[in-house]
Amino acid sequence: MAHVVIMGAGVGGMPAAYEMREKLDKQHKVTIVSDRETFQFTPSNPWAAVKWRERKHVEFPMRSYLERKGIHFNSSGVKRVHPEQNRLELGDGARLDYDYLVIATGPKLAFDEVEGLGPHGGFTHSVCTLDHAMKSHDEWEHFCRNPGPIVVGAVQGASCFGPAYEYAFIMETDLRRRKIRDKVPMTFVTSEPYIGHLGLGGVGDSKGILESAMRDKHIKWICNAKVTKVEDGKMHVTEYDELGQEKKKHELPFNYSMMLPSFKGIDAVFGIEGLVQARGFVTVDKHQRNQKYKNIFAIGVCVAIPPVEATPVPVGTPKTGYMIESMVTATVHNIHADLTGQTANQEATWNAVCLADFGESGVAFVAIPQIPPRNVNWFSEGKWVHLAKVAFEKYFIRKMKKGGSEPFYEGSIMKMLGIEKLK
């Protein structure tokens, strides 16, 4: 009997557990280790932050759903991975041995890299976790009673720009509905070299479409921006030119700010030679397997992926929903192949597919492959994206409660876009 342990129970880890349990013989044991008892649907966080969702709408206790499918569950969290011993040191001091380990924890949020950044001890909000979004949720009403300037965006080294754009337009929509938009100047601050870069070198006409949307909604922007310090009500930003030379310093006043931080690897794996790179992200081959520790796989945001291109201010590469889904399927297939004496040869298709809601409309893009030149380079906008994102939320939460393991992007969005297969 083999013991497969999955670290993390988010949008990558929980589907991986279901798919693993379905694929492997019953003699093998599957365990999820998480640092919380609940599943949280992270893509809904921008809605929760403006009170469009309550916690109960996007979170549920997951133990009973997992155990019903024969998946063991431990909510102690992982303090440290000991790959040489095939062992986890758990948060409560206990030890857990494994035969295969799948790391699906997501990142550590590096708020500490910018003075004054973040919702805990800093002066900016975040939509990276549900707890962060709910902190904003509790304060948004107060801001709307005392409106003023908003600064929103992503700092240097950030690698997930979609939620920054989503939240900017969702806030703008909510302010218009409240009829106070005229009282709120908005500035989008980003490390991207241009609007719509997205950490992907742009997709289709992402630059033109997003710039046009921002002009239409009267949102100003600063690109090639490095946030040097945040004070109470003031953000210090240095803008660089295309050669990386300092262009202008900005002092931006704000009554409310949400800035996405850069990401790092989690403490449990940080600094383990051969497992992670300098930032703590897990290094894997094309089969999602670590090169040194062959029984360790990784999926999602915790995986090391180099930037698509050099930029004046550091910009990371995003891991979108389809990419994570593809990593899950490849990992499950390869562990199953190992256990049955077959060749572990399944490769994830690292393509970028994303739905970004803007409150009343939205944008969607497909980049195949993620790194240019591409076979598919498509970007579009419309009200249908908003409806699709709402439907996706309901579908995914229902799937996690049901214990389904069927892929969403390959089976649904790709067919809707008229793309038969991603290669």
Image (cartoon, rainbow, N blue to C red):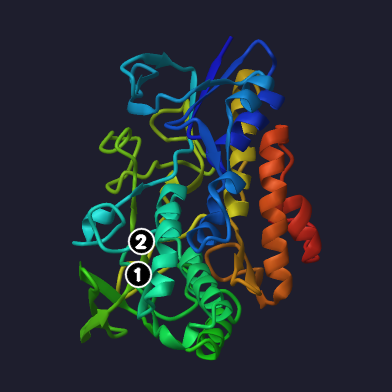
Q: Is residue 94 left or right of residue 64?
A: left
Q: Position of residue 381 (x, y in %)?
A: 66, 77
Q: Position of residue 418 (x, y in %)?
A: 81, 65
Task: Report which residue position mark 2 lands on.
Answer: 125
On residue 192, the disc is: none
Helix, strand or loop under label 1: strand
Q: Position of residue 390 (x, y in %)?
A: 68, 59
For the C terminus, the image quarter is: bottom right
Q: Is residue 344 visible?
A: no
Labels 1 & 2 near each other (Cβ < 8 A): yes
Q: Nearer the viewer, residue 423 or 102?
A: 102
Q: Position of residue 43 (x, y in %)?
A: 56, 55
Helix, strand or loop under label 2: loop
Q: Nearer the viewer, residue 208 or 85?
A: 208
Report how many numbered discs are placed on residues in the image: 2
Q: Nearer the viewer, residue 83 or 177?
A: 177
Q: Is residue 308 above or below residue 99?
A: below
User: Going 51% across and 41% down the picture, which residue do you hit?
Assistant: 299
Answer with mark 1 or mark 2, whichever residue precedes in sequence. 2
Amino acid type assigned to the residue bearing label 2 in the image: His
User: Going 45% across and 25% down the picture, which residue do you hit?
Assistant: 75
Quadrant for residue 421, please give it: bottom right
User: Going 41% across and 61% down the picture, which residue do you hit?
Assistant: 159
Task: Report which residue position mark 1 lands on.
Answer: 257
For the N terminus, the image quarter is: top right
Quadrant for residue 386, please give it: bottom right
Amino acid type assigned to the residue bearing label 1 in the image: Ser
Q: Is residue 346 left or right of residue 164?
A: right
